[in-house]
Amino acid sequence: MIQAPRDKIEQQTSISAILVGSDFESSHPQTVARVVKVLVQICHWASEEANRDTVISYLANVGYGRDITKEEYAGPLKGRFDPTINDGIKSGFQEISHFAVTHKLVRQAPNFSGWYESKYVEAAYKDLHLQDYWKDVP
């Protein structure tokens, strides 16, 4: 577990990804686009402050309980559920990789070059009229 003092955390976010093999992506681009679009819809819904109680309840049921979850998600939800592939996400994966190598959890860090494809997220933003929704997230 990595713990950082709360006053040192600028923006908390979750780092996650969907990995798709290049053969699957080239053979089934519509399927990839549909899955990403649904995930962007979920991120949008979870980012809306009007849904905070439901989001907290769900996360509390699958995590650490309501009090801890409510505290962890005290800030704006928009930053926590931003699906944008940006430098922060990329550096987050690099940090996780470095940690894993340093602590001998893996033998070598993966080469993330070519792993990131934003065209599906950008297309979902356009289809859902969300091009500017996450623009103000730091």
Image (cartoon, rainbow, N blue to C red):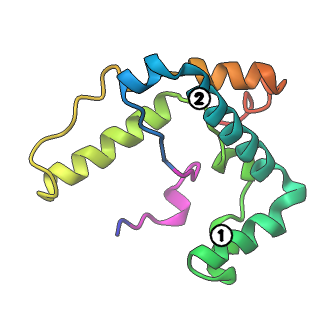
Q: Horizontal and vertical percent for residue 13? A: 57, 50
The answer to whether residue 22 is left or right of residue 133 is: left
Residue 116, numbered circle: none
What residue appears at the point 11 percent right and 57 percent down from the top-left corner?
Answer: 104
**Mark 1, residues whose alpha carbon is within 10 Å: few (<14), some, or many (≥20)?**
some
- Per the rendered image, the range of residues in magenta is 3-14
- The residue beneath circle 1 is 59
Q: Of 107 and 68, which appears nearest the observer?
A: 107
Residue 31, numbered circle: 2
Which mark lies nearer to you, 1 or 2? 2
Q: Horizontal and vertical percent for residue 112? A: 30, 29
* Type of secondary structure dominating the magenta stretch: loop
The answer to whether residue 127 is left or right of residue 70 is: right
Q: Horizontal and vertical percent for residue 118? A: 54, 21
**Mark 2, residues whose alpha carbon is within 10 Å: few (<14), some, or many (≥20)?**
few
Asked if residue 134 lies in the magenta stretch, the reply is: no
